[in-house]
Amino acid sequence: MRIGLVVDSACDLPRDFLEREQVEVLPITVRIGDAVQVDHRDEAQTLAFLESHIAERGANAETIPYTPEQIRDLFLERLVVEYDYVFCMTITGSRSPIFANAQKASYMILNDYKQPRAAAGNTTPFALRVIDTQNLFCAQGILPVEAARLRAAGEPALRIRTRLEELANHTYGYLVPRDLYYIRNRARAKGDRSVSLFSAALGTALDIKPVLRGHRGDTGPVAKIKGFEPAVEKMFDFAARRVRAGLLTPTVTLCYGGHLDGMRALPGYTRLLDACTEQNVEVFESVMSTTGMVNVGRGAVVVGFAAPEHRFD
């Protein structure tokens, strides 16, 4: 059985992994004023965006995901012919309409796939499963990495589906933002009042940085630490302890809102990599997507992994 994998461009994984594993990317369009950029997970393009004057107005950006009709067309034109079973793994449905759009598209695809498959000489059934990863940024990448690993091992589609749905409930993403004002302004632009002006001003004045956790579709602070670098170091050291305690997949994902050398110079980074090496855990590093950066700003750091239930300490 030919198994295909699809993610959206908010999924922070290295381009070489996506190309090697032939992972299809649903692009997200970012519009800032008159400037429009289609996010195809091109790191050079993302960095050029970051360094341009456009990034200064990113808090007011509009992000436009593929519609159900665009997703349907992509599948019917190519994917239903190239594959027999496709897993579409999306950013958490609590923060984006992509999951809902893919779900709607799946009904249309399953109704209409027979003709294009027959025209290609294939009369066997086609199957599709849309999975809400329940997470964001590089934490979203835990599922497609595991899917690729299971596919390479020859696991059947049903086994892969069960495993991915289980992992979605046990995937954690931890983020330290650099600029609370940016997050507050971005939240307000999207109609989200969860970050108040007072909180942003107080945090900036005192140089207090939150550690935010994404898990099962929810996001919120789990710690507040003075200073960006100390907050990142605490997050990295915590992740290293989780690695040594035992993960549910041999994978840690990292992403950064800027050049990766900036992340690699942060305190705690080397200790986290050492822990991963000791435990035979593979590390995937990527520049944060354009979509991600317009939502949390430059310089944010995220680490993702799947693990048993735990508390941040």
Image (cartoon, grey):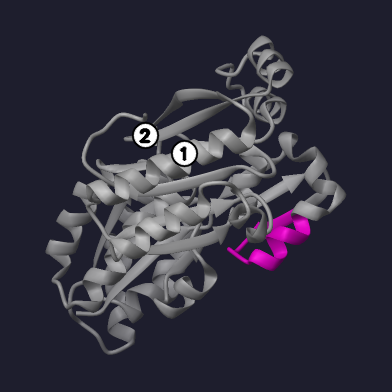
The count of marks equals 2
Query: Going 32% across and 72% down the picture, which residue do you hit?
Result: 4
Crowding near the residue tagged with mark 1, few <14, some 14–19, many ≥20 C-alpha atoms within 10 Å:
many
Query: Going 84% across and 53% down the picture, which residue do you hit?
Result: 52
First along the sequence among labels 1 and 2: 2
Q: Amino acid at mark 2?
A: Gly
Q: Which mark is residue 311?
A: none
Camera-nearest label, 1 or 2: 1
Query: Going 72% across and 59% down the picture, which residue do you hit?
Result: 47
Range of residues picked out in magenta: 36-49
Query: Quadrant where the N terminus lies?
Result: bottom left
In the rendered image, is residue 27 in sight?
no
Residue 241, quarter of picture: top left
Q: Which mark is residue 217?
A: 2
Query: What residue is disc 1 on?
Result: 235
Up-down: is 51 above or below 32?
Answer: below
Check the image and name the residue furthest to the top. Answer: 198
Residue 175 placement (x, y as % from top left)? 51, 38
**Front one among 270 and 117:** 270
Left or right: residue 32 compared with residue 233: right
Q: Amino acid at mark 1?
A: Met
Query: Going 61% across and 42% down the picture, which residue do you hit?
Result: 300
**Magenta segment includes 299:** no
**Front one among 45 and 305:** 305
Local SS, label 1? helix
Residue 3 placement (x, y as % from top left)? 27, 74
